[in-house]
Image (cartoon, coloured by chain):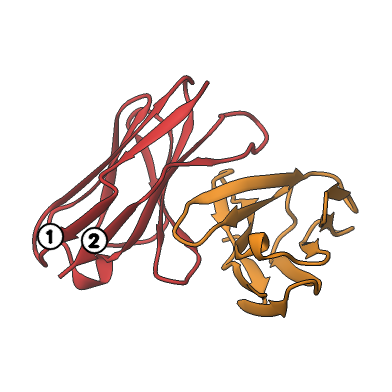
Chain colours: A red, B orange
Amino acid sequence: SQTIHQWPATLVQPVGSPLSLECTVEGTSNPNLYWYRQAAGRGLQLLFYSVGIGQISSEVPQNLSASRPQDRQFILSSKKLLLSDSGFYLCAWSVRTTLNTEAFFGQGTRLTVV
Amino acid sequence: GQQVMQIPQYQHVQEGEDFTTYCNSSTTLSNIQWYKQRPGGHPVFLIQLVKSGEVKKQKRLTFQFGEAKKNSSLHITATQTTDVGTYFCAGPGSARQLTFGSGTQLTVLP
């Protein structure tokens, strides 16, 4: 069966520090991968999505970047965190087909920038 | 680009009352999905609708896809405290990336 791992679960980082969040998927190949951010009590904002290794599409200009060094690994990074980067970061995967299929989410990372 | 709007943003109901959330897209959707996020948790897939006018039921939950495939609704009959959470609709973007609506946060008062 397929599983998605996302870590860490919580993170407190000072302003100006770097960030690296990692997400890995097991049990499937060639997945679509997503990074979403959710502010407290708000909706899911799509940050990045990837349809293959090295293929990253950015939805919004921001202080963050993403990379997909391996088929089932998706990394969210920042060189210098801002206070506004605080939020709940969710990684998700879906089967890559011609039609949309359901997305499976990781447990999320609660990031607080202080 | 494609936008998915969802109303209401918040809804408080007494246990046993019905609840409905609506989702509207600026463009025609090939399909629409619904997710539920419990407080403190991650979104979990509920259902996908594909056909124009499609209606699907899951126990007390009824999902509808509009005839024009631009809107959808989720109706819960006789809410229970276990229904608490945020309900999201989601549709495919121009590159089939999954774009979520703003969500409706449901509170069920016992």
Query: Same chain for the residues at labels 2 and 1, yes or no?
Result: yes
Q: Point out residue A9 in the picture as x, y percentages from the top left corner.
A: 29, 48
Q: Is residue B55 left or right of residue B73?
A: right
Q: Quadrant of the C terminus of chain B?
A: bottom right
Image height of B41 relative to B101, above or below:
above
Q: Point out residue A44 in the picture as x, y percentages from the top left corner.
A: 48, 60
Image height of B54 relative to B12, above or below:
above
Of B46 and B93, nearer the camera is: B46
The residue under label 2 is A63
Give the image quarter of residue B51.
Answer: top right
The three-letter code of the residue at mark 2 reads Asn
Of B1 and A73, nearer the camera is: A73
Q: Quadrant of the N terminus of chain B?
A: bottom right
Give the letter of the chain under mark 2.
A
Cβ–Cβ under 8 Å for marks 2 and 1: yes
Q: For label 2, count other residues whose C-alpha is less than 10 Å away and answer few (under 14), some (14-19) or many (20+).
A: few
- Helix, strand or loop under label 1: loop
Image height of B29 relative to A92, above or below:
below
**How many numbered marks have been drawn onto this rendered protein structure?**
2
Give the letter of the chain under mark 1.
A
The three-letter code of the residue at mark 1 reads Lys
Q: Is residue A95 left or right of residue A83?
A: right
> CA–CA distance between discs 2 and 1?
8 Å
Mark number for residue A113?
none
Give the image quarter of residue A5.
Answer: top left
The residue under label 1 is A80
Q: Residue at x 26, y 59 (%)?
A: A111
- Helix, strand or loop under label 2: loop
Q: For label 1, count other residues whose C-alpha is less than 10 Å away and answer few (under 14), some (14-19) or many (20+).
A: some
